[in-house]
């Protein structure tokens, strides 16, 4: 989570199998979803679609087709894996 004030909640139920890792605000280079968006932009940049709804449909189709290995390669930063492992070890 990028820890921006707009992305906070007063109360939030976090499941036991979820660990939140807070990142500095305004640092997209450490946010793994930014790499996914970059990849998607590269795949969809040259599409010429008549309506925003068609772009949404195309975007959803691409996301649904992403193999787990590709998502992992785009998002599994070593520092995030280490942070998640640390947080999970503390809650066990």
Image: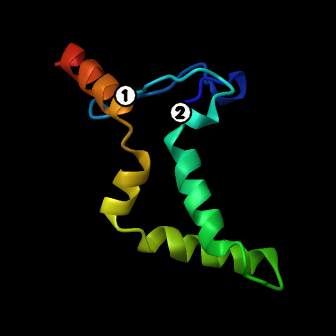
Q: Secondary structure at mark 2?
A: helix
Quarter-of-image position of residue 67:
bottom left
Q: Which residue is mark 2?
A: 30
Q: Is residue 9 left or right of residue 82?
A: right
Query: Relative to 57, does residue 41 appear above or below in the rendering?
Result: above
Q: Residue at x 40, y 57 (%)?
A: 71
Q: Residue at x 30, y 61 (%)?
A: 69
Quarter-of-image position of residue 31:
top right
Q: Is residue 3 left or right of residue 21?
A: right
How far apart marks 1 and 2 lie (CA) works out to 9 Å
Q: Earlier in the sequence, mark 1 or mark 2?
A: 2
Contact, CB < 8 Å: mark 1 with mark 2?
yes
Nearer-the-camera pick, 88 or 26: 26
Q: Residue at x 83, y 85 (%)?
A: 50
Q: Which residue is mark 1?
A: 79
Q: Residue at x 78, y 84 (%)?
A: 49
Query: Relative to 60, does residue 71 appear above or below in the rendering?
Result: above
Nearer-the-camera pick, 15 or 79: 79
Q: Is residue 55 left or right of residue 1?
A: right
Give the mark count: 2
The location of residue 79, given as percent across then percent down, is 37, 28
Q: Quadrant of the C terminus?
A: top left
Which of the labelled discs sits on residue 55, or is there none?
A: none
Q: Residues within 10 Å of mark 1 (few under 14, many from 20)?
A: few
């Amino acid at each position: 989570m990028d820890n921006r004030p707009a992305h906070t909640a007063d109360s939030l139920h976090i499941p036991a199998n979820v660990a939140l890792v807070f990142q500095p605000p305004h640092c997209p280079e450490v946010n793994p979803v930014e790499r996914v968006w970059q990849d998607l932009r590269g795949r969809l940049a040259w599409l010429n679609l008549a309506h925003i709804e068609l772009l949404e449909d195309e975007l959803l189709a691409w996301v649904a087709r992403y193999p787990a290995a590709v998502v992992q390669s785009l998002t599994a930063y070593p520092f995030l894996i280490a942070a998640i492992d640390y947080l999970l070890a503390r809650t066990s």
